[in-house]
Image (cartoon, grey):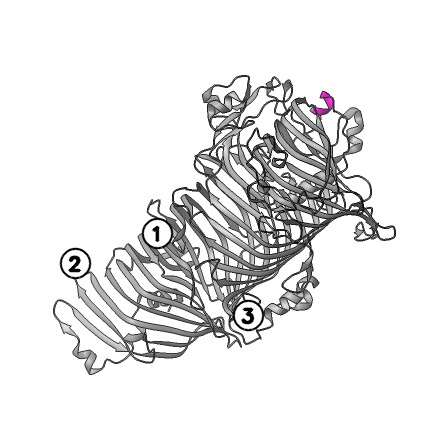
Amino acid sequence: MKALILSCALLILPALALEPLDSQALAEVTGQGGVYLSGDLTINDTGGPLNRDGPSQNGYSWQTACGVNTTDKRCGGRIAVNTDQSGGWLVLDNIRGRFAFEGLTLTTRRIDSGFDGDGANFNRDVMEIGLPDQLDYNDVSFTIANSNAPRPTDAGFQQTDIMTLNINGTVNQQGNVLLFPTGAP
Amino acid sequence: MNPARLAFLLLVSPAATQALQPLSDQSLGAVTGQAGITLEQSGHVSVGEISYTDDGNRLQIQNIERGEQSTIALPSAVKHVTDVAADGTLSINTTVAPTALAIGGVRINDSLASTGAFRLNYSGNTHLQLRPSNGRYIEGQVDTSISDAELIWTTNGHSISFDDILFRADIDQFSIGDAYKGTKQGLDFELNQFAYDFSTGGLKLGGVSLGTLSGELALSGSAQLYAGGRLGNQGLQLDAAISIVNDSSNYVQFVDDGNALYMGDFNGALNVTGLTIDVANDHLAVGVDQLDGAFNANRILIGDSTRPLGAVQFDFLLADDGTNGRFNRLRLYPGVRQPVLAALPTDIRPYSSQFYQPLNAASDGLSAGIDWNLTSANASYIDDNRLVVVSGIKSYGSGDITFDVRGFDHDNNSATADKTAVAIGLNDFNGSYSIEGLRVGNKNAPLQGGAELLLSLEVFQAMDFNLDAYTYITAGGVSGGGIQVDGDYLFSDTNIGLSVDDQGQGIWATGVTYDIHMRQFQFDVSNRGISVNRGEQWSTMNIDDLRWGDKLAGRSLGRVTLERFERGSSLEILPGGAGAVCVGASAGSQSACDAAGGRWEDRGEEGLTVALKAAFEPEGLTSDGTIARNRLTWENNRNSDGNGGYVNGTGTRIEFDGISTNDGLGKSDSNDYGFRADLNIDVYETKVVKKSDGEDSQNVDGKKGDELIYDDSSRTTYSYVETPTAAQKQLRPLGFAVQGNVSFKDFQIDQVRLGHPTGGTQTVFSGVVMQNMDITTNLTATPIR
């Protein structure tokens, strides 16, 4: 769970110093240790747990057979967000796909030199996320919709699908993201 | 007489106490004269007290009674057959009929409380052979066996017992001679080929079995015993060197309902230097100058006997550090020494008070004060011959601990009968530990970062802690054997290193207060592995400052608070990792994986799988009647307290409130599925590619996209290779390969809010509902320099 805290902290951190670093700056980031990550992340490749034994209510049943190529929209993940208690729900529906990457690095460092002289003034520790050179998208897709209730099994549920995105391809990335506290704690 | 020689004579004369009694006519009549002497004896022994006095302080063993097993007041029978062989060897064969030996309690200087009562029921046979020796006092061999034995510890009317104990020990050769240490003269004990095996029919609490324990071990070693301890003029001092002989038949196993935790094919060594024992005015003082050792276990099974977990190796050094005032000491007190309530952190006082409420100053039990200084240790895990070392483990600290056996309302239901529990209290445990880093491939490989990888197992790189903890252990898991644990724990004034280097710089959670409450946590061994059914748990972790850099002076991100409330969560630890996986594509064979653009990795048979289910509950009442919830809060822009700190509750905060899981229909639905995370963990070669042209930080040249390949199996130097051969791929960096799956049916956040003490609260999101998620990852995580 403490790992979860760290993850959450990363998610909610202000995105600072997102400008790409040049080669010289990268070379002046002194290294001590860290982790090199590679791999992939797949969302609902063969459906989700509700498709296996989920509930049926108000004319909607979650249960269905989902394969890699199944197009049934129930097979994807679903996120519904309500920004106003009396209003409707913004929905990302039928979330599926695979991301693959190689060479994401995580390290903590002190930057106290370089950066055209700014490093000495900065003189702080940072968490450095070294971006992977390539991030591959394989059939990453989701539908943007709005609905009157969060769950398809809710009474009187209505949903309007607005658009569906499907992404295949490769994103080339370079440089690091540096995370560090700023302002009053 | 030299106390050490006196102690020795008492130890080697099992019949010494009986031999002091006059023989009856009947006993004399049983003495038959053939090749030797047969002595059949029947007797009942009752001794009010045996006292050992050290510098005027008395260790009192009281109310000792020995008699027939079913009725201890009746005489028990012993038969000795004594013979002398032609070479002068004295042979004594002793057979003990079912007998009971009871000790009413152990006190120090007439202490009000005692350790509680001990009773050993046993029958046995011992064959002792003694012969004269050149240069030694004596040498010989001994075979002994104890059967149908039962060992019982009782405090305050409740007992813990080991039943049906079978114990056999064979010492092929032992000898006793003189030992010298500086000006001290003592006794030297040498043991060669000391083999023993044991088994118990049941480890029982209040008559309910936790499971059975058995083992087999081959040892050799020596020990030197001297007069004079660490306190005053008298006492005992011991040096020893013991080896666990490298024997594939060595094993220890615990069996719960037919399923075993097994550790076999192990060896090791233990060296003790300057172990002292003194009797002080209210405690027995044990100290050691240095304790070091190593242990290697080559076969470990948890539940599933067909899937070994891998091998583990451990070496350690505990040594005194006078410069920093860190020592290895143990103070043993009779009775339960209760803490001063007002000296404990406020949040734990109600639980401490409740824990010690049934006891008073006269209650039996055992207490200890502990100081430790672990100078260095290394822990290694070997998965399919791939080794990772958690290196440079250090720890020091001190604390007080109490043990007793008592009745406990294990199900929070006064209508049902209480169970017998071992109650363990930890008071004011102040300590610190740190891990320098990892070594991969071999134990001499360069130290690397990457201990952050252990965060997934909730192992932190460094921690300063103050722990108060109260635990009840009762017999019985979900089914049959196993144990149940209930407890209340508080970490206060704690700093946690989440990602730190060998200089202690990195990301720290400081000023941490973490209170944890566990109810009906049931541990079992199944045919799959170890399972933990987590009945109910609620906790609050408050981090005053999440700091970057130094743990005291680093800049803070602000305050983070995580509140948790779970019911019906579970954890399984299973043998075996991911096996063969396709990374980067979806395929079931190497050819299909290659064709789909993925990378096929066969991670072997060994490894570890952790399956976690967290069932997050909506805000509600705990079994203690308090209100608990799942909520994450981040606060910053706090007012300064004028002393370099900040006042909690004065800043702007964002809250993720009302986090819960359910089975798909909302909070009114069941919550059986929860939030699940299955992690298959292996140690495996990983592909590490260079991310830019030119020299890296170690001045090794290469092109962007080249693979990092070690030059040889020592894994000290490396090169960048454009297209590695199959042999070079075996020299890829080793790391943790994790195949993870996270899934949930329905995960809800009631609201996300912004708040300020004077500005009020504004809702950002009135609800977030996530459903039907199944996320699979194949990650390889490699430590880097």
**Disc marking residue B87:** 2
**Disc marking residue B448:** none
Q: Give the label, 1 or 2, closer to the camera.
A: 1
Q: Secondary structure at mark 1?
A: strand
- Amino acid identity at mark 2: Asp
First along the sequence among labels 1 and 2:
2
Give the magenta part as a residue range.
A22-26
Callout 2: 10 Å neighbours few (<14), some, many (20+)?
Answer: few
Task: Give a yes or no on whether discs 1 and 2 share a subunit.
Answer: yes
Measured from the top left, where is residue B265 in percent x and y? 37, 45
- Amino acid identity at mark 3: Val
Q: Residue furthest left?
A: B34
- Amino acid identity at mark 1: Leu
B238, B452: nearer the viewer: B452
Q: Is residue B652 visible?
A: no
Q: Quadrant of residue B64?
A: bottom left
Q: Residue at x 31, y 65 (%)?
A: B148
